[in-house]
Image (cartoon, rainbow, N blue to C red):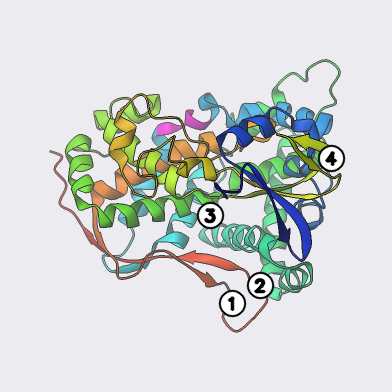
Amino acid sequence: MESEGPVCQTEFRGEPAYAIGGHEADIAAWKSPDNWLYGPPSSGGNFFRQELGEMHVTQLDGEPHRRSRKLILPAFGVAAVTRDYDLVADTLARGMREWPGSTLDLHPAFSRLITQALNVSQLKESISLEEINKLVTFEEGFIPASALEPEARQRWYDTAEYSDARQAAFSYFESVVDERLAGTRKHDSLDLVMERAVPEGLSALSRDELVRAVYLLSVAGVGNIANILCAALWALGKHPDWISIIRDELGDFGPGSLKQASLKQGMGSLPNLKAVISEVERCYLPAPVIPKMSAGPVNFMGYDIPGKAHILHLHGLAHFENERYAAPLEFDPARWLDKETPRGNAFGGGPHLCLGMGVTRFYVPLMLAGFISSFDWAFEKPPAFVSQAPGLDYAPLTTSFFSRLSGRVSRRV
């Protein structure tokens, strides 16, 4: 697309569409949010509305989106995400210690462990392994199905396994909300949302909106975090010199160590780990394309785009522009040790910046550091997309990354 300019005509699900991309196009698009629709049918169908209701923040536009985001945003701030740092760190460390010293599919293993940690910290709920599995099955079935054609997607949503997982997930979400509405307080991120004073002129979140907030706090995006971790481990396996660099930097990383404690304040004391994660975000974006629609006729960077046109915003394209990054197709964490390297935008930008960015940037370094310190790993194949139900031609894809694990002897005294 670089040779075509910031806008080019293409096709999306059999209909005319416009692809926009590149750094300048990103800035222009994010500075004009009212030109774009993110809600149905901009995402290729009504699946968000169907599965999460009319008022789910992801599919709202304009003032309704600004209201909903403003009311739930405190639950995703740094203070809220890191509030129970020691509990999260301990949960993740104990979970990884239980992994077998053999071949393991890391994507579902990461997804389950992240879900467990989110629910004991962001919601302070005691959650069973069965409930964790139901939540992950729902999330991994729900979001990847967005890539399917509407008819195939509905057939998938009608399957017994997905329907059962969705019912179990919403039963859990609703029970959490109803308990809080009845007066229970747990001093977690949900309480933070419910107890925060509602700004003048805005209505408080309804029960249904709180249920969707619990979805966001408990399981939303865990597959994307797991994808980033799998990509990082695959890339590091191809560049073992960086594994040695990070291990030297981490030292005796683990519960109670100074290096682990320092992560609560960010990665300032771990510049090489930060560099690796930044390069993984640049090269392996969790969602490289953001579908939306033009709200009306718009002249975008000199190109006339009609109203209600499908827009494919390739916000990851800027990560591979030669004028921004030297040798952009190479995995080179060292580029991020240079303070002049342009910042990436793996999580989008503007008013629809990913709500879960802070959660991801908290969990990825903590889990990656813990994994690298705890295991040696080897793999035969890179992470791959596989069918969630082999034999069903309408099943969505999920990530699979089998690695052979062997525990490392702790260097801690």
Q: Earlier in the sequence, mark 3 or mark 1?
A: 3
In terms of secondary structure, where does tag 1 sit?
loop
Rounded to the nearest angstrom, the CA distance separating label 4 from label 3 is 30 Å
Q: What residue type is labelled 2?
A: Glu
Rounded to the nearest angstrom, the CA distance separating label 1 from label 4 is 37 Å
Q: Which of marks 4 and 2 is nearer the N terminus?
A: 2
- Residue 15 position, x and y percent, is 79, 61
Circle 1 residues within 10 Å: few <14, some 14–19, many ≥20: few
Which stretch appears magenta? 81-85
Query: Height in image: 31 above or below 355?
Result: above
Mark 2 and mark 1 residues within 8 Å of each other at the beta carbon: yes
Circle 4 residues within 10 Å: few <14, some 14–19, many ≥20: some
Magenta span contains residue 78:
no
Q: Which amino acid does label 3 sit on?
A: Gly
Q: Residue at x 37, y 45 (%)?
A: 367
Q: Which of marks 2 and 1 is nearer the N terminus?
A: 2
Rendered image: mark on residue 161: 2
Magenta span contains residue 82:
yes
Rounded to the nearest angstrom, the CA distance separating label 3 from label 1 is 17 Å
Choose top left, top right, bottom left or bottom right for residue 144.
bottom right
Rendered image: mark on residue 389: 1
Q: Which-is-in-front pick, marks 4 and 2? A: 4
Mark 4 and mark 2 residues within 8 Å of each other at the beta carbon: no
- Residue 389 position, x and y percent, is 59, 77
Rendered image: mark on residue 295: 4
The residue wearing badge 3 is 223
Q: In this view, does 383 lie to the left or right of 154?
A: left
Q: Which amino acid does label 1 sit on?
A: Ala
Mark 3 and mark 1 residues within 8 Å of each other at the beta carbon: no
